[in-house]
Amino acid sequence: MWRHIASNFLTLLVVIIFLLGGMILWGQKQYSTSGPLSEAMCLRVEPGSTMRRISRRLEDEGAIASGTIFRIGAEYGDKVDDLKAGSWLIPERASMSQITDIITRGGASSCGTEVVYRIGIASAEVLVRELNTGTGRYEERIAFDPAIDEARPDLFTRVRGQADTRYRIALAEGVTSWQVVEELKSVDVLEGAVAELPAEGSLAPDSYEVRQGDTRESVIARMRAAQDFILAEAWQNRAEDVPLASAYEALILASIIEKETGVAEERRQVASVFTNRLKRGMRLQTDPTVIYGVTKGQGILGRGLRQSELRAATPWNTYVIDALPPTPIANPGRASIEAAVNPDSTDYIFFVADGTGGHAFAQTLEEHNRNVAKWREIEAERAAN
């Protein structure tokens, strides 16, 4: 009898172990297989949230099939206590394992809201943007000029109070170092002062993610390091016949190209004009250098140049001096730096605005004069209207 009972017990135990093993394998498969989420979602994890609370929300929103399996899997992986506050992008069909990794990995929030402090040539702007999980693109919610709009929009105030809001500083191509430093003063998530004005041209126009409490000096250092890298790489890959003695001269020429054209396709053509002039010993005769001699990069001129200014002997007036000015006149972007060291091969030595936002190029003075006459007609028509 006891032998029969023992045999039945062992049989039952084997069945239980077999079923338990099957359940574990099934649970593991459920945890690692693609999930039911049909569209990417942005999951906001508040400070102090628990894995249980998050698993319920994920289950309610259709991102996971079972909150229980999700929690067991997180416990098995020893990640229950690693939950990170922030806004996390959960991709379509993400498995429970992938979601667990996303919300426990840490780092900067991967979705949600970001505040962009945009430093432009003519003005600065603050934007609040939010990630559209369907398109994967940030979409603008509000924008305002901090110098004009003293009262901050409610949405800006609200997102500034959220721990998971991301912050970014976007530097436009062609801004001056003085403009950058002045605008960084109004970026309220940064701390400290900039001890010394960075050398003109030394800051790379780009988008820089920052965190609340970062110092302004640290942001400037990142901009400098980025520009140093871009310039060194471009100089190493320069054309053999560019009439430039150093990488710094390339930076000076790039800054002039940056200020002369906003049309990306024209940069290398504009570079070819200046390169041809340098090779022939001709003066560059470019208005942006004259303007820099007047403003020293501290703001925009806001009017046309006077004849007296075109004749004034400043170190940057390329109507008066030979060759390049002594310093850059702005902070050029990568494309203008690359154009300066690898210009198009042309015979152009003149260019003038053509009325479309671009320029008309010419090889001879006669051809250039005709282009200038056309531009004067366009100016007169616009003034009449």
Image: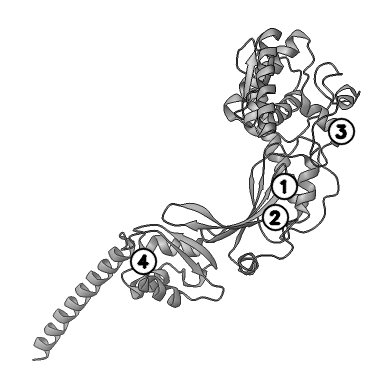
Report the front residue among 82 and 240. Answer: 240
Q: Which residue is mark 1?
A: 123
Q: Tag on residue 145?
A: 2
Earlier in the chain: of badge 3 and badge 1, it is 1
Whether residue 178 is visible to the viewer of this picture, yes or no, is: yes
Earlier in the chain: of badge 2 and badge 1, it is 1
Q: Secondary structure at mark 3?
A: helix
Marks 2 and 3, how far apart in space?
Answer: 26 Å
Q: Which residue is mark 3?
A: 294
- The picture quadrant where one finds residue 256 is top right
Report the front residue among 91 and 128. Answer: 128
Earlier in the chain: of badge 3 and badge 4, it is 4
Amino acid at dot 4: Ala
Earlier in the chain: of badge 2 and badge 3, it is 2
Q: Tag on residue 63?
A: 4
Q: Position of residue 153 (x, y in %)?
A: 65, 65
Q: How is the image coloured?
A: one colour
